[in-house]
Amino acid sequence: PQKEKDGPGDFSIDEKTKQVGLTESGHDHLEDLLHQHGLLGEDESLYDPKNLGIFHHLNACLRAHHLYHKDVDYIVRNNEVVIVDEFTGRTMDGRRWSDGLHQAIEIKEGVPIKQETQTLASITYQNFFRLYDKLAGMTGTADTEAFEFQDIYGLETVVIPTNRPVQRKDHTDLIYLNQKGKYDAIAADVRECKERGQPVLLGTASIETSELVSSLLTQLGIEHNVLNAKQHAREAEIIAQAGRPGQVTIATNMAGRGTDIVLGGSLRAELNALGKDASEDAKQAVRDDWQKRHEAVITAGGLHVIGAERHESRRIDNQLRGRSGRQGDPGSSRFYVALDDNLVRIFAGERMASMMQRLGMSEDEAIESRMVSKQIEGAQRKVEAHNFDSRKNLLEYDNVANEQRKVIYTQRANIMDADNIAELVAGMRVNVIDTLASRYIDDDQVRQNWDIPGLEAALRNEFGLAVDIQNHWLQANPNMSAKQIKEGLVELLEHIQQEKENQVGGDIMRRVEKYIALQTIDTQWKQHLATMDMLRQAIWLRSRAQKDPKREYQRESFELFKDLLDHIQFEIVRVLAHIQFQAQSAADEAEAMQQQAQRQHDAELARAQYHGSSDSSEALREPTPEEIARTGRNDPCPCGSGKRLKDCHGKLA
């Protein structure tokens, strides 16, 4: 990778947008490698249309290796790559990255590669929330996002005063030159708190950081609990006791939020542990012990929250701080920052690094400055603004898809609710035949320019119609217009469909039409979503031609949607034209009835054996020779076994 912009290297990395790009030298180097391994022909280029798949896979692999990190963005559990939510620190089971990225990470980690997922339905959170008639919400950290709530949803954010005055002391950030100095200072802070009996909640931004801090505390002999995506099952238990005197808890990205950390530990959990049969004296002893611990923690200063780094969002920092000092309890918080933290390095690194160097600081020295803290908050605002722009941009693109989504879902719901869609299908036949035939014949054209053989071939290939328009229809009526030919073709298709309906009955035909219509809509919509996704990713290239990508996307997606609606009708008519029903012969019906009787008998026999009944053996009687003689070899045996005679008592005859 390039170390600096426009420097030497095969590819550039943009950590802000999590994208990579090949340089000229990287392109040449890659083509040489592909030629050497026979994956690219001698005269072929990486940018040939048929080789774009290789380029796509390469891009996914580079992103997997350089932008997505184990125990930060994902974990490996049970031989599977599981995504970790960047905001909550919890695993997102069942979720997979798209565009081959998840498969590239599976290759990187050496776990089994699973099939790439295909989107069946998609909607942004913003458009999903707009489906509700009324919107409202409540959270302790909405104020930093007030502008977005107003801009996207038209919602005003109101700050409600706290129930009791906040006694928590929020100390100024401590800034260090590098990670080593920062973690040494964190360990020293934890040790001091533990010695005076003050509980500590240490928040980290990733699983990797939580395990790094955990190993450091273990080396120093400091007992602690770790709460991250790997210890999700113990979350309630760990949080319940996080407020005990001298207790140290490391939590990833606010894992365990929503549970109050009670100073002194959870009294309720301790009482529940005694059991229902515990005596009142035992319960009172637990209450007295808890009260002593509660007062000891308050004397020590309450819960001390340590942030191992600033998060990209001020809201997450505020959530971490807010774990301490609840309901008027005492508490304190402090964030530790290093110049090589991702947030500072990517968004505010150069200015702060030069300032620290001018001060001539060593790695174990820290500066405590409101000015520096404000610069870090400025970097967070940059990230928040960048993320907001990304969400708003995505929403503007999804608004186009949202209108299409409404049309498709309305069509689908109408078909689901209808008992009979025969008229709808009949209208589709008219539209499809008109569209297809107009490519070959038209009343506005000179008849000599009509392509009758082409029309006949298309009807044969698409609908299985062997119709001789040239030698039969036009011979019988030389003045037949294109409109009359189209009407004749529609009547022919309807006649064939009516014959199939006569064969199986109207009820079955209606169910088949409904099933095929729904199946076709789902399949075509799924393919349309994939096409729209590819269009959205590539449309930005239009900006190089001085065109507005959003407007181009609207225009292109509208054309794609028109094609989709036409293709849905075409596929429904085509499948119905090709579908064949197989009549069931009398022998097949008898065979089916025989199998059903056999299954019923086996079930009754198993039920009788399960309940220990002796009735099952009495139900089977020995048939007389006359009964056997009167029974056909393929008919049920008169003994009542449910088997055919030839497979039962017929063997003895």
Image: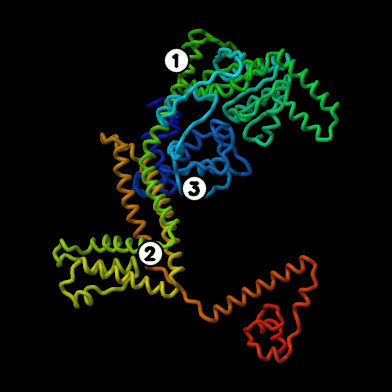
Per the image, the residue denoted by label 2 is: 422
Mark nearer the N terminus (3 vs 1):
3
Residue 441 in the image, given as x and y percentages of width and height: 20, 64
Per the image, the residue denoted by label 3 is: 117
Task: Please indicate, yes or no, whether residue 318 appears anywhere in the rendered image.
Answer: yes
Label 2 and label 1: CA atoms lie apart by 71 Å
Mark nearer the N terminus (3 vs 2):
3
Nearer to us in this view, 452 or 641: 641
Residue 548 in the image, given as x and y percentages of width and height: 29, 35
Nearer to us in this view, 328 or 564: 328
Crowding at dot 2, Cα within 10 Å, few <14 / some 14-19 / many 20+, comes out as some
Q: How many marks?
A: 3
Look at label 1 and name its amino acid. Arg
Crowding at dot 1, Cα within 10 Å, few <14 / some 14-19 / many 20+, comes out as few
Mark nearer the N terminus (2 vs 1):
1
Instruction: Using the rendered view, name the quadrant where residue 106 is placed.
Output: top right
Q: Which mark is residue 351?
A: 1
Judge from the rendering whether residue 585 lies leftward or rightward of residue 197; answer left or right. left
Of circles 3 and 2, the one toward us is 2
Label 3 and label 2: CA atoms lie apart by 35 Å
Look at label 3 and name its amino acid. Thr
Of circles 2 and 1, the one toward us is 2
Judge from the rendering whether residue 279 lies leftward or rightward of residue 537; answer left or right. right
Nearer to us in this view, 60 or 316: 316
Q: Residue 609 carries which label?
A: none
